[in-house]
Image (tube, rainbow, N blue to C red):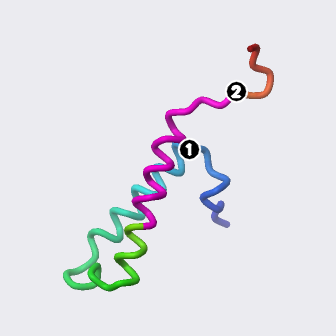
């Protein structure tokens, strides 16, 4: 069973989004120009920006001393 992207660590989210973007951008000529596909790419690019920002933030782990 696949894990929903919301439950993945930031680095894994970024990897998943990059793979999905690569898949959608390399569709055969014409198929990537449909409104649904363009909307999907736009949503993935927005999610990618969030995943990049999240991967740069270090959240305290349980047991970390502050």
Which residue, as the protein is rendered here, is positioned at the far left?
29
Q: Is residue 10 above or below residue 33?
A: above
At a point 76% along the width and 14% down the height, the residue shown is 65
Q: Quadrant of residue 52?
A: top left
Q: Position of residue 13 (x, y in %)?
A: 53, 51
Q: Quadrant of residue 58?
A: top right
Q: Position of residue 5 (x, y in %)?
A: 60, 58
Q: Position of residue 63 (x, y in %)?
A: 80, 21
Residue under numbered circle 2: 60
At a point 64% along the width and 56% down the height, the residue shown is 6
Q: Which mark identifies residue 10?
A: 1
Whether the magenta-drawn stretch holds residue 58 is answered as yes
Chain part drawn in magenta? 43-60
Are the two marked residues, 2 and 1, in contact with CB atoms closer than 8 angstroms?
A: no
Secondary structure beneath label 2: loop
Which residue, as the protein is rendered here, is positioned at the far right?
63
């Amino acid at each position: 069973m696949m894990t929903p992207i919301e439950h993945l660590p930031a680095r894994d989210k970024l990897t998943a989004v990059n793979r999905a973007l690569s898949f959608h951008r390399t569709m055969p000529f014409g198929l990537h120009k449909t409104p649904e596909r363009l909307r999907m790419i736009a949503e993935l690019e927005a999610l990618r920006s969030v995943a990049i920002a999240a991967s740069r933030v270090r959240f305290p782990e349980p047991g970390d001393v502050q």
